[in-house]
Amino acid sequence: MHLLLLLSSFCAIIQAVAVSTCDTNFIVTTKVTPSYWRATFSCPPLNIQGLSFFQDYYALIDKIEADSEVKVVVFDSSAPDFWLDPFDVLNTVPPELSWDSYWGNVTRLANLPVLTVAAIRGITSGGGAEIAASLDIRFGSKEKAIVSQPEVSIGVVPGGGGLDLLPRLVGRARALEMVIGSDDMDAETAAHYGWLNRAIPDAQFESFVDKFARRVAGWDHEGIAAAKKIINAQSGFPTVNEWKEGFTAFATNFNRTVVQNRVAAFKKAGLQTDLDFEKNMSEIVLNYTGPGPWNV
Ligand SMILES: *[C@@H]1O[C@H](CO)[C@@H](O)[C@H](O)[C@H]1NC(C)=O
Ligand SMILES: *[C@@H]1O[C@H](CO)[C@@H](O)[C@H](O)[C@H]1NC(C)=O
Ligand SMILES: *[C@@H]1O[C@H](CO)[C@@H](O)[C@H](O)[C@H]1NC(C)=O
Ligand SMILES: *[C@@H]1O[C@H](CO)[C@@H](O)[C@H](O)[C@H]1NC(C)=O
């Protein structure tokens, strides 16, 4: 797919910086019991989706698929402020690993007879929010969970399935607000919209999620499998062609000069390296509207 190759060369021309993307062990898997697993994003402080995220994510899906005992997998994070941050745009991630393999694997996980739960106690932004949206259930800390699709504020669109998953989760009007507003959304609003299943006070969050997962892990596998299969079939999961349309729009727009200049300016201001930049991005983007050049 030539677009993917083009995208990777655009990324390559943006010089690599010393950003923590972790060479190995991005996802640490813990078998709490044989039926209840925890998959912990462990590349603090930002959990940026780089090479090892994709490697580990697909390898984990292989392990879940091959295991006959696992019934519920909770995806959490060891980084205090972030659940999962966007795709790494400052370092080259081989397109055959990221995009060529992406939707097939996301769909494979969605179709496994295992309940997947995003346990979100931090910022989940861009591609990270799209991974969350592709999982079966999302629980968020009332005080700490934030969801954001910032792509349009940069001049692109969500390319990781958000354009297809969001309208199914929250409806057309709210999807348009989330995507085109490109702003941070707090957990209570996200729960009200239906992006989160619910927002849980942080002090009770871990015990709530653990109790839920242990409950599910106790059921017969057959019941879980049949329920998920039929709900999936009747609610529909975005097809590869639907996803590809959004990805192509992302890649095409990422190539625009104004976007390349904006990403370069963001990089100078701390994109992927500075915690304050990453936390305050929804405000900072307001300084980079229009064609530039921006005073950086
Ligand atoms: C999942 O990713 C692996 C590794 O990149 C790839 O070989 C495989 O084809 C992907 N699976 C699907 C169903 O796309
Ligand atoms: C991307 O930009 C390059 C030049 O910088 C151009 O050759 C190429 O056709 C563009 N691709 C797309 C998909 O816009
Ligand atoms: C936003 O940035 C300011 C400094 O510009 C910093 O003091 C503040 O803590 C940041 N806010 C967050 C939520 O990180
Ligand atoms: C936006 O730019 C103004 C003027 O340069 C600056 O004072 C302000 O701190 C910037 N805001 C953010 C959030 O970066």
Image (cartoon, rainbow, N blue to C red):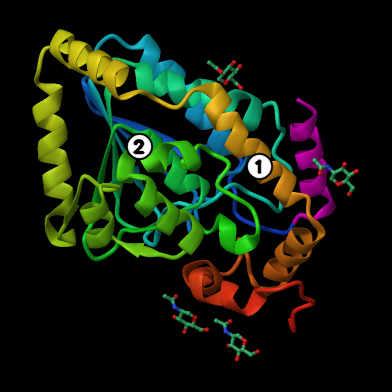
> Element at badge 1?
helix
Q: Is residue 10 magenta?
A: yes
Q: Residue at x 23, y 57 (%)?
A: 141
Residue 267 can be seen, yes or no? yes
Asked if the residue at label 2 sits under 8 Å from ligand 1, the reply is no
Answer with the quarter of the image where residue 20 lies.
Answer: bottom right
Q: Is residue 12 above or below residue 286?
A: above
Answer with the quarter of the image where residue 70 lies.
Answer: top left
Marker count (numbered): 2
Q: Is residue 189 above or below residue 296?
A: above
Q: Ligand 2 quadrant?
A: top right
Q: Residue at x 54, y 50 (%)?
A: 86
Question: Is 137 left, or right, of 16 in this rendering?
Answer: left
* Residue 262 placement (x, y as % from top left): 72, 66
- Residue at the disc numbered 1: 249
- Residue at the disc numbered 2: 168
Question: Is 109 left, or right, of 249 in this rendering?
Answer: left
Depth order, front residue of 153/12: 153
* Residue 5 placement (x, y as % from top left): 79, 33
Query: Magenta span covers which residues?
Result: 1-16
